[in-house]
């Protein structure tokens, strides 16, 4: 049973997240042979204040 976690910054719409889950599920099923009904996708959203690149928080740029 594959479990996929996708980490994203907040701000995506429900439609975008729905499409992401569908495409990730399809990709995992195609590449691993796992049936779609056995694949779980977790979307982990974070605030821009909790994400940094090159020593700077995204929210500070």
Image (cartoon, rainbow, N blue to C red):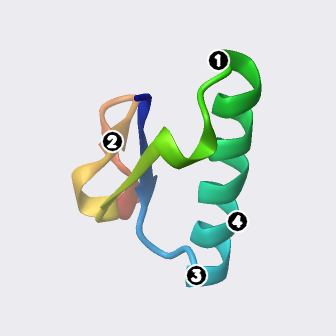
Mark 1 to mark 2: distance in Å? 33 Å
Vertically, is 53 above or below 40?
Answer: above
Rendered image: mark on residue 50: none
**Of the two numbered discs 3 and 2 in the rendering, the one whose residue sits closer to the viewer:** 3
Q: Name the residue tied to disc 1.
A: 32
Q: Nearer the viewer, mark 4 or mark 2?
A: 4
Percent coordinates x, y for residue 33 in the rendering: 68, 21
The residue drawn where x is 30% and y is 32% is: 55
Separation (CA) of disc 4 from disc 3: 10 Å
N-terminal of the two: label 4 or label 1? 4
**Which mark is drawn over residue 19?**
4
Residue placed farthest to the top in the image?
Answer: 32
Q: Which structural element holds mark 1? A: helix
Q: Residue at x 45, y 54 (%)?
A: 8
Q: Are marks 3 and 1 in contact (CB under 8 Å)?
A: no
Q: CA distance from mark 4 to mark 1?
A: 20 Å
> Label 2, on which residue?
52
User: What residue appears at the point 41 percent right and 69 percent down from the top-left corner?
Assistant: 10
- Give residue 19's position: percent from left, percent from top: 70, 65
- The disc, 3 or 1, on the residue closer to the chain's N-terminal end is 3
Tell us which disc is closer to us: 4 or 1: 1
16 shown above or below 1: below
């Amino acid at each position: 049973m594959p479990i996929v976690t996708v980490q994203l910054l907040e701000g995506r719409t429900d439609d975008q997240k729905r499409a992401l889950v569908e495409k990730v599920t399809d990709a995992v099923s195609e590449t691993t042979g796992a049936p779609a009904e056995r694949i779980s996708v977790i979307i982990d959203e974070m605030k821009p204040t909790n994400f940094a690149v090159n020593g700077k928080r995204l929210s500070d740029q």
